[in-house]
Image: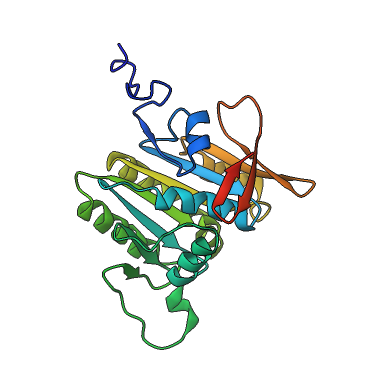
Amino acid sequence: MADELGVDQAMPILKKNRMSTGITDLDVIMEGGHQNPANILLVGPSGTEKAVFAYHFAAAAGKNENTYIICGNTSPDDIVNKAANNGIDLNKENIKFIDCYSSTLGKGEIKSTPKVTLIDGPSALNDISLALNEAVKESQGKRIRFVFDTFSTFVLYNPKDSIRKFLGVIEGRLKSANATTLYLIDEGVHDKQLISLIEHGMDGKYLVVEKEGKFFLDIPGANTEIPIRVGPTGITVM
């Protein structure tokens, strides 16, 4: 009966169609983590909490999973260092980057490497789509984690219709590839109409909420906002 319900028999509270958030206490609250496959919108202030939440997810990839971080407003090295400062190791063999930032710096020739696929800026949506296709191909037979850090950058660099078409193409494609994708959105940057457009194809929306200097996570299905704190080992559920 447990198998019929999609429940992990080793830990009956954890459902099989889930992908770990990388935060053990949060996985228990969420019955195993994020839905898999799924497209998930993560909205919050532009500070540390939202990014660290995503880095936990990226670093939690198991042996039969790959992670791809699509960089919009910072370099792969900066992301790895920022995660390390919060106790999270992104310097793993199964974590790769689609770098849409470094080519915008104008610091001479930068080339792709086995770990980093270089894209000619956040407005090159066709090239990003092709890079995602390659990620899916090389991850055949595995589950995939994608993180857009941040998707706000891509929204700011492209017309609304282009973003709509881009999402219309990749959302279904990535879900079909057994991927769970986090789209990070900076709070207060976009108008409500644009946020509604982005939300349209999402399977879930999480909010990082700040109240009087304290942070909370608002997730679907939870009866209350979950207090969180960023410390030397990343996010802790309070």
Nearest the viewer among 162 and 38 is 38
Instruction: Please state if 50 lies on the left or on the right of 77 as rendered.
Output: right
Residue name at image x 44 percent, y 75 percent: 102
Quadrant the C terminus occupies? top right
Quadrant the N terminus occupies? top left
The quadrant holding residue 223 is top right
The quadrant holding residue 38 is top left
Q: Is residue 196 visible?
A: yes
Q: Is residue 162 visible?
A: no
> Please, is residue 83 above or below residue 140 in the view?
below
In x, y percent, where is residue 158?
50, 62
> Please, is residue 26 above or below residue 120 in the view?
above
Residue name at image x 55 percent, y 52 percent: 234
In x, y percent, where is residue 204?
50, 35
Residue name at image x 47 percent, y 50 percent: 56
Residue name at image x 55 percent, y 55 percent: 51
Instruction: Please state if 74 lies on the left or on the right of 144 as rendered.
Output: right
